[in-house]
Image: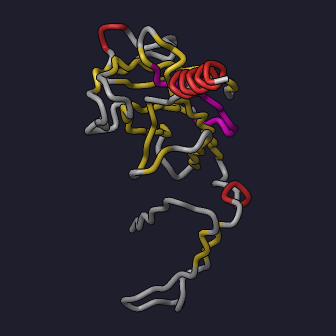
Amino acid sequence: MKRILLSVTLFIAMAISVNAQDIVLYWNGEPLPDTVGVYGDAGGDFELVFEAYVKNESSHKLQIAAARETIQAVEGTDNSFCWSGSCYSPMVDTSADDKDLILPAGQMSPDPPFSGHYTHGQKSGETIVKYTLFERGNVTNCDSVVVIYKYSLTGVEDNVFGGVSISDAYPNPATGKVNFDFNLSGVNHASVKIIN
């Protein structure tokens, strides 16, 4: 009986260690969810950019590589990625061996060494790209994120943001001070950009 119990305990411990995730993608000090959205409209930049920090949560240094998989693309658009100081053309899906990031145990990359780039070419639609950061030589030790790039020529649709709303500026006309009412239901990170 003791032998069976010991065998089961060892099997469970091995299964847990095999399934442990040593590489974790972060943004703003929090692990990234499985899917994120990057949105833009005609008043914005020609390129939409996704960035992530990488953390080695193991007890040893890791040689980390990057890969990209385009799941769905708007015709006439491009997507690419930059990893560990090198930017790759839209034709490349996996980073070069000599450009891997060597990340010490327990450390997070100092700057976002990973960025995904989407050039929309003024074409409305949704492009979906999966990025995977993995240990070179052990592709099962990885973390992935699916990024939905959405570009609109007429502006970002209200329903894209779900429970997010913002009021018109008041008082109108304003003199020196302006107010906005807003609702950010379910939003973990937001920023405000004032353009004169």
Residue 126 shows up from this direction: yes
Report if residue 78 lies within the magenta region: no
- State the residue at coordinates (69%, 54%): 160
Quadrant housing the N terminus:
top right
Q: Residue at x 48, y 37 (%)?
A: 47
Q: Is residue 62 above or below residue 145?
A: above
Up-down relation of residue 32 to residue 67 (above or below)? below
Q: Quadrant of residue 195?
A: bottom left
* Residue bounds of the magenta highlight: 121-134
Residue 26 in the image: state x and y as whole percent. 43, 42
Colour setting: secondary structure
Point out the residue furthest to the front here. 1
User: Residue 158, relative to residue 84: is it above or below?
Assistant: below
**Most foreground residue, 55 or 164:** 55
Please indicate whether residue 43 sits to the left or right of residue 61 in the image. right
Name the foreground residue: 107 vs 27: 107
Question: Which image quadrant is residue 115 in?
Answer: top left
- Residue 193 locus on image (x, y percent): 42, 63
Residue depicted at x 51% and y 14%: 139
Q: Is residue 148 placed above or below 76 in the rendered structure?
A: below
Say if the magenta span includes residue 133. yes
Residue 76 visible here = no
* Tag count: 0
Give coordinates of residue 167: x percent, y percent. Answer: 61, 78
Outermost residue toward the right in this view: 159
Q: Of helix, strand and loop, which mostly describes the magenta segment?
A: strand
Displayed quadrant of residue 149? top right
